Amino acid sequence: MTTELKGFSWTPQSLRVEWRDGHRAEFASLWLRDNCPADRDPGNGQRLVDIADVPPVPRLSGVEHAADAVLVDWQDEPRHARFELDWLREQSLDRRTRRPELDVQRWLDGADIDARRRFVWRSLAALESDAAARLDWLVRLAQDGIAFLTEVPGREREILRAMSAIGQVAETNYGLLFDVRSVAQPENLAYSDHGLGLHTDNPYRDPVPGFQALHVLAASPEGGDSLFADGFALAEHLRSTEPAAFEVLSRTPVPFLYRSRDAELYAETPLIRLNAAGAVQAVHYNNRSIAPLPLAGEALETFYAAYRRFALLLREPRFQVRLKLVEGDLVVFDNQRTLHGRTAFSSARFPRHLQGCYLTRDSVLSRLGLLRRAAHGAAR
């Protein structure tokens, strides 16, 4: 974008800029000095200096307007800096404006949701052929924590082809992909006819898989309905209604363990993980793989009371999206946010077969960023 400058003013401490459309922003001298373009490699954009190389209290000594930029001088330094006005404007925008995928859209009352209207659905052909549609689909996946594809060919391993347009598949002890269908003496209850309560996958890994994909190869006409719930919305609901329980679940490390003939996986993480600002960053809930807790006495009782309360919330039908996926449907969801489950079915009467895989979080978000960069014609 090219934006016209209306005016600017400055003091030794800061630069204030106003564009003709009324947008205004102020940039501290220290911030400008730290982001001086001359201190970045012109090819890859990486910094060439450390913060220790920057003067601790830099002060502006002069500012001029030149075409689509401002030229800045600092006191006691023989250097000049050129800041493009478009770049300054973009840095002044809210991060959710610059990166819409950060604008999380929570959905608490899942039973009231029509999944085929509320969430994004695209055919695989549209996703592969239309970069704008792919960008929109990925942004919605990040915002909602879930997105759907249709018309994916009903052949084994087609999920890997579909995921090549979305991100990098992560290989685990299950391989690049896994089959969700009933087997004799299953190592995991997912490979049975049992219904599965809402959960997230693999909290016993470090890192926990970022996204999960499931492709329907054979759907059961009776049972086997898919269940989804927004873990972020549920965690915030718990915070607002029972803050003490929320506090316990967000600060208590929980051990998770998975054992099979060829794997021994163990990790500790709170059921609700917060970021540095106190916002919910991840939900890890899997009653099938939680290991004995190293707690005793009052701490044990306090944790289990909070744990039980969260588990009861997950059982409430009003928080669950329930839908019947059909052959050729494929769902991708945030495995550190969106809980999933299913109703029971009878494989003896109606075989049910899904293939699944995990994707690394950074690869999905990188694909989104590259598509946005191409759409805007410049690095963001």
Image: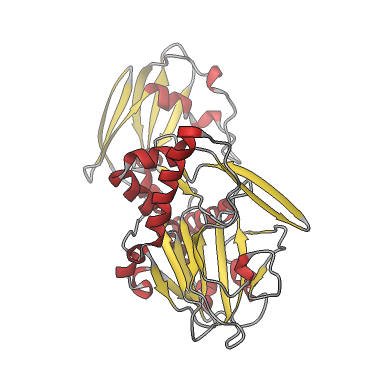
Residue placed most toward the observer, 40 or 80: 40
> In the displayed structure, would residue 216 be above or below residue 262?
below
> In the displayed structure, would residue 31 be above or below residue 242?
above
Residue 219 falls left or right of residue 180: left
Residue 218 falls left or right of residue 308: right
Residue placed most toward the observer, 25 or 20: 25
Q: Name the residue furthest bottom.
A: 349
Q: Name the residue furthest front.
A: 297
Q: Quadrant of residue 192?
A: bottom right
- Whether residue 280 is visible to the viewer of this picture, yes or no, is yes
- Residue at x 46%, y 44% (from the top left corner): 304
Residue placed most toward the observer, 359 or 14: 359
- Coloring basis for residues: secondary structure
Q: Position of residue 50 (x, y in %)?
A: 57, 23
- Residue at x 49%, y 80% (from the top left corner): 223
- Residue at x 41%, y 58% (from the top left corner): 314
Q: Name the residue furthest right.
A: 262
Residue placed most toward the observer, 219 or 143: 219
> In the displayed structure, would residue 262 be above or below residue 6?
below
Q: Position of residue 55 (x, y in %)?
A: 48, 15
The tally of labels here is: 0
Q: Position of residue 22 (x, y in %)?
A: 21, 42
- Residue at x 35%, y 41% (from the top left corner): 89
Q: Quadrant of residue 87?
A: top left
- Whether residue 273 is visible to the viewer of this picture, yes or no, is no
Q: Position of residue 157 (x, y in %)?
A: 67, 75
Q: Name the residue furthest top.
A: 76
Residue 369 falls left or right of residue 258: left
